Image (cartoon, rainbow, N blue to C red):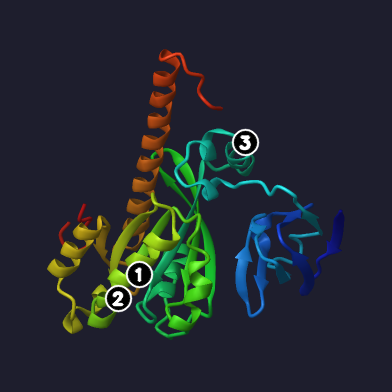
């Protein structure tokens, strides 16, 4: 069953249920903001709503962008590129590869920024996505996101970057978004020993709720406040090495290493992805030959 809705300059309330897919008949899905109450983003660009019951508030970012929406129930919802971890199927078979081709990008990665409240996660995201910075502190409510496309090694990579709230009361909400994330920016504040001590707990959450192959970069933010430093670089680098994470110190305010953090994380995700594809190809060759039928670091630097 299909339901069509006209979108004007304002909000449209839709009541959906498990496994509904929202698609744009005309326009670009990047021009949509899709949220649940109270203003928690759950989808963009046709993602699946895996909720028993949800009220979706749809608002057009542009007066001319969206003319009509279709709300369609899927018995077997399609898988998207980032929902299959580093499995080669996500990149070489439909609908993953086909979706990338139609959207004019090579890869799409879902990234999450996590860490204690007030370490600068939102400022870091805005610096990277919009090259903007404000010193005013506004606590993130639940979760927010931005989309940015970058070029790495002749590949066009589309990033969905999710900014999570650090407060404990939002933890149940934010951990629900870990699944399908291919990379994490685990952030602490170099002027806050407490935020650094919490890194191990955040790392445990990543291990518990995310894919086994998710890549992580440990980021010590607020490098511009060197005089107020409480976390030695050596301690952070050692912890990152023990956890198997990349490591950077950065400053959203002074735009130090912000781009490098994202570039390095994307590069290592691509490397792991290529290793997975090559490994899968080697395994297929081995199975065929056996008569089997294959199934279709210094400060601010990387510590690894």
Residue 183, given in percent of the width and then of the height, sits at: 41, 56
Circle on res. 198: 2
What is the CA distance from the residue labelled 3 to the residue labelled 1?
Answer: 34 Å
Q: Secondary structure at mark 3?
A: loop
* 3D distance between C-alphas at marks 2 and 3: 40 Å
Mark 1: which secondary structure? helix
The numbered dot on residue 85 is: none
Question: Callout 1: 10 Å neighbours few (<14), some, many (20+)?
Answer: some
**Front: mark 3 or 1:** 1
* Residue closest to the eye, 132 or 2: 2
Whether residue 154 can be seen here: yes
Label 2: how many residues lie within 10 Å, few (<14), some (14-19) or many (20+)? some
- Which residue is found at the position 86% from the left and 54% from the top? 2
Q: Is residue 5 above or below residue 273?
A: below
Q: Position of residue 99 (x, y in %)?
A: 62, 42
**Nearest the eye: 100 or 199:** 199
**Left or right: 224 as drawn, with respect to 210:** left
Please name the residue shown 45% across and 40% down the image. Answer: 155
Q: Are marks 2 and 1 in contact (CB under 8 Å)?
A: yes
- On the image, which quarter does residue 187 sit in? bottom left
For residue 285, above or below residue 150: above
Q: Which residue is mark 1?
A: 202
Q: Earlier in the sequence, mark 3 or mark 1?
A: 3
Q: Is residue 169 left or right of residue 44?
A: left
Which is in the foreground here, disc 2 or disc 3? 2
- Residue under label 3: 94
Whole-Å distance between the Cαs marked 2 and 1?
6 Å
Can residue 254 be seen by looking at this rendering?
Answer: no
């Amino acid at each position: 069953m299909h339901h069509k809705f006209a979108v004007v300059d304002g909000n449209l309330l839709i009541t959906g249920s498990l496994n509904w897919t929202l698609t744009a008949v005309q326009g670009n899905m990047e021009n949509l903001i899709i949220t649940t109450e109270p203003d928690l983003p759950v989808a963009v660009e046709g993602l699946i709503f895996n909720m028993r019951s949800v009220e979706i508030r749809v608002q057009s970012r542009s007066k001319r962008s969206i003319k009509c929406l279709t709300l369609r129930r899927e018995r077997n919802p399609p898988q998207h590129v980032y929902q299959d971890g580093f499995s080669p199927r996500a990149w070489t078979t439909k609908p993953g590869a086909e979706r990338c081709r139609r959207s004019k990008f090579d890869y799409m990665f879902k990234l999450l920024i996590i860490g204690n409240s007030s370490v600068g996660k939102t400022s870091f995201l805005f610096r990277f996505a919009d090259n903007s910075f404000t010193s005013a502190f506004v606590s993130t409510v639940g979760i927010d996101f931005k989309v940015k496309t970058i070029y790495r090694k002749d590949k066009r990579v589309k990033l969905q970057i999710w900014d999570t709230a650090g407060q404990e009361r939002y933890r149940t909400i934010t951990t629900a978004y870990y699944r399908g994330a291919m990379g994490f920016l685990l952030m602490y504040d170099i002027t806050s020993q407490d935020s650094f001590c919490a890194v191990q707990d955040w790392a445990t959450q990543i291990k518990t709720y995310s894919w086994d192959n998710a890549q992580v970069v440990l980021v010590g933010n607020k490098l511009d406040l060197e005089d107020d430093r409480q976390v030695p670089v050596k301690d952070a680098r050692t912890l990152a090495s023990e956890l198997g994470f990349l490591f950077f110190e950065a400053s959203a305010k002074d735009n130090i290493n912000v781009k490098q953090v994202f570039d390095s994380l994307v590069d290592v995700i691509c490397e792991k992805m290529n290793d997975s594809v090559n490994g899968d190809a080697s395994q297929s060759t081995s199975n065929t030959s056996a008569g089997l039928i294959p199934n279709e670091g210094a400060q601010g630097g990387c510590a690894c």
